Image: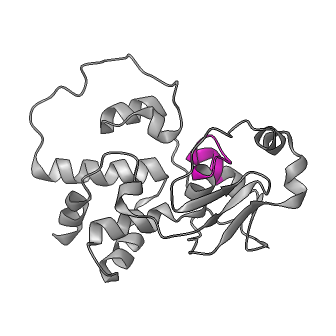
Amino acid sequence: MAKNMQPIAKRCRTLGISPAVMGYSKKTSIKNPGGNMRKKKSEYSMQLTEKQKVKFIYGILEKQFRAYYDKAEKAEGKTGEALLTIIETRLDNVVYRLGLAATRREARQLVNHAHFTVNGKKVNIPSYLVKVGDVIEVKEKSRATTRFKAIADGENASVPAPKWLQKDANLLGGKVVAAPQRDDIDFPVEEHLIVELYSK
């Protein structure tokens, strides 16, 4: 399975996003602080940067990202907004949003290791798209691990879940109570530039 192993702080600086978006609230980089102060970007460069930003934040490679775009293009409403909301429903992102992992990278690894169930059935595919009504929980056998014991003891109790997810600390999981909306996206992105890029 292909993995994105790019250095977090360096890549965040290049794309103009805060490492906190990735779950790395204390991660900073002071190398070459003026590295982004370059000449004005071309239209293509801005479009490409927006696409790379979203791909990097969610840990998605190009082939899968294109498939999400094609699906969003067929959905009702604005293609860019549909794209972002589809990606938000990835299982690894939902695990991260529920506070069951410190970062999306950790969430992806935990899902790969089959620590979660969706509606009582084991799912080990990070790209699995959840639906309204789905219940995501830590698998019974996994609850005894040090990682999930810490969460059960309130390690991430202060991590707020977005309004489309209902967090259930007792179950070490949560429920999808609504479809994510555009204002649930917690980082700056101009999705219309991605649409323009793929529309060429």
Q: Residue 152's quadrant in the figure?
A: top right
- Residue 167 position, x and y percent, is 65, 55
What is the image's colouring? one colour
Which portion, as a residue range, is magenta?
97-108
Residue 184 drawn at (x, y percent)? 42, 55
Residue sitting nearer the eye, 15 or 170: 170
Q: Is residue 160 left or right of residue 45?
A: right
- From what the image shows, is residue 195 above or below residue 57? below
- State the quadrant of the C terminus: bottom left
Residue at 56%, 75% (x, y): give it: 131
26 left or right of 147 in image:
left
Name the residue at 58% across, 42% down.
Answer: 103
In the rendered image, the quadrant that contains the N terminus is: bottom right
Tell me, yes or no, if residue 17 can be seen here.
Answer: yes
Residue found 90% across the figure and 57% down from its top: 141
Asked if one can make out residue 114 in the rendered structure from this viewpoint, the answer is no
Residue at (15, 28) in percent of width and height: 38
Q: Position of residue 7 (x, y in %)?
A: 48, 33
Q: Is residue 125 magenta?
A: no
54 on left or right of 91: left
Decide if residue 69 is on the left or right side of residue 126.
left
- The image shows residue 48 at horizontal and vertical percentages of 24, 52
